[in-house]
Amino acid sequence: MALALTFTTLAGVWQSEAASVKRSWQEEVMYFMMTDRFHDGDQDNNIPENCSPDFYDAQQENIDLYHGGDFRGIELAIKNGYFQDLGVTALWITPPVRNSWYSLHDKDGPKTGYHGYWAQDFLDIDPHLTSKSSLSGKYYPEGKEGRLEHYKDMIELAHQNGIKIVQDIVCNHIGPLFYYDIDKSEQHEGKASEWLPPYSTDGSYLSHARWAKEKSWGVDGLSGPMGQDRLFGNTLTTTGVLRNFDIYWGKGFNRDSLGKNNGEEMFCDFFSLRAINTSPNTLHFDRLVDEFVEIYRFYIEDIGVDGLRIDTVKHVHKEFWDAFCTKLRARLGAKADKVFFFGEVYANTYDDLTYYSVTDDKKEKSIGSLLNFKFTWAVRDVLRQKTQGSAEALKGFVESMYSKIPDFDALTAKEIRQTQINFIDNHDGLNRFLVRDIPQENHDLALGLLALFEGIPCIYYGSELSMRDHVAHRKQNSETGRLTLFDRQGQRHFDHRKGSKTFAMLSKLIALRKQFPSLIYGQSQVLQIEGMDTKSCFALKRGEGAGATLILLNSSNEKKKVAMDQVLSSMSSSGIELIYDNGKVIEQPKARHNFLEPKSLRVYHQKR
């Protein structure tokens, strides 16, 4: 069977809005970007009205300040075909809602809300992201509706090019919008005691809470939405519950809270971010759920968002997520089947996959999918080490995470496995895979596993160009990898960047994934090959019988022998064909190579 794979035309299959709607989420290839760090397409929005110019770094070097990335930068990339040529079919963007632009962060020093996780108004878009006019020259109305219209236009452009949009959302906290006036001065002086009082186990600081009014911070009292918004000719009515102090915990901050599992991780402010009380035992629970349901129904139905990535899941009560997800899906009706939710549960376990996938009664879908931290750590255990890591970490991951998941009424075990979001690096503590002491070839292998494993692959922006964080090292947890991709100091042209070796390699692997259904829907089985060095080599079979694929990895610096006769017999008597070998697609398939080259990845396909 000859395989003439033309990668420039394969992407064309995914170029229509109709195709994007019909695709299952298992078929997606996701790309996660911090919008402020992707591409500054419109320099006129870098310092919005009232925003202090001190919050913006024109050199795009200080990671605590705004760099200028915006919707126009994303639109220009879509128009160029940058994502389409890579094979990306879904863009996950950081929260676009209007943020507080500044916060006092204790000994870490002041920081800005460039990342989007410090909401000021959940029904507005941050003016750092939007332009005064569209790509075609149409002028947007001033204010909130104009900003939302630009967001809607960006999503429409993505849909026209077969790309879905996933919006990052936060229901755990609002931004640094109120302080604790402990000294009763009725004004804040920028003291740590006002913004970051120590965590109170038994009490609360809410009696001292006051809304801040600092226009240069983007903060002008209260949190939004305010109750009614006139948008696109309709009145959108919300509960305004976020304006009430009594829905927050107000218990202060403890640096250890993120890693706790005793409830403190739910109650604690994170720095000066104000944690929302999501307990089902409160009088405001139903109003709070309804508020967020109405907000994100609007983004899905009226703006066109295709999916939601849910931040800080384990810092919110499970009952909230069950109520939010089921009510939102009910509001969406038939459209709910096309909308995808996935959540962030740091250090997720096998139990987390099932716990958050369905409601407590196991009869309805809850969040459904999670970011797959276990995949990340398995890949890093093998390839992000100073010395040779053991490939057995991958075997352990597959056998522990994929083999025991039960079927539920709302979701099958196969759906749960194949909608987990696989990634190798991110914007938080895990940082970039490619730091100063990691070889390029290890990064290439990690991207290969990302593209070929069971689950939805998610590329962290810049990984397709081997963006390296020269500051961090492999043992360091930091945010130093939040670099600007298309910076103004270097070469920004999309076509130039698409010429990189990593971009070409990854686009070929993604094309293979789309070409062979077993690499999307095939279940995973670790193969035990006699004589194979399991410390450095790994063999994974995807699917069964005709159309199955085999992935072979050699993570060592030495050539390794593989008993290909045994491999062939384990697949089928009709044999298999080599279709990918160490960065090269094999257009005239070959049957067997009994050695794996150092630091290599090989893919075989079962003849039909």
Image: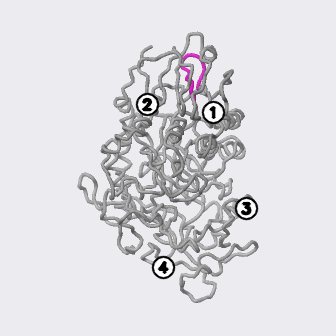
Left or right: 317 with respect to 230?
right
Q: Residue at x 40, y 58 (%)?
A: 234
Amino acid type, callout 2: Ala
Q: Is residue 607 above or below residue 527?
A: above
Looking at the rendered image, the disc whose residue lies closer to the viewer, 1 or 4, is 1
Q: CA distance from mark 1 to mark 4?
A: 58 Å
As helix, strand or loop, the secondary structure at mark 2 comes to helix
Q: Earlier in the sequence, mark 1 or mark 4?
A: 4
Q: CA distance from mark 2 to mark 1?
A: 27 Å
In front here: 479 or 159?
Answer: 479
587 part of magenta stretch:
no
User: Badge 2 is on which residue?
Assistant: 511
Which portion, as a residue range, is magenta? Answer: 542-553
In front here: 143 or 463?
Answer: 463
Q: Is residue 207 above or below residue 520?
A: below
Amino acid type, callout 3: Gly
User: Badge 4 is on which residue?
Assistant: 213
As helix, strand or loop, the secondary structure at mark 3 comes to loop
**Crowd band around label 3 with a 10 angstrom C-alpha radius: few (<14), some (14–19), many (20+):** few
Q: Earlier in the sequence, mark 4 or mark 2?
A: 4
Left or right: 603 with respect to 44?
right
User: Badge 3 is on which residue?
Assistant: 263
Q: Is residue 140 above or below residue 369?
A: below
As helix, strand or loop, the secondary structure at mark 1 comes to loop
Looking at the rendered image, the disc whose residue lies closer to the viewer, 3 or 2, is 2
Badge 4 vs badge 2, beta-carbon distance below 8 Å? no
Q: Earlier in the sequence, mark 3 or mark 1?
A: 3
User: Badge 1 is on which residue?
Assistant: 536
As helix, strand or loop, the secondary structure at mark 4 comes to strand
Total labels: the figure holds 4
Badge 1 vs badge 4, beta-carbon distance below 8 Å? no
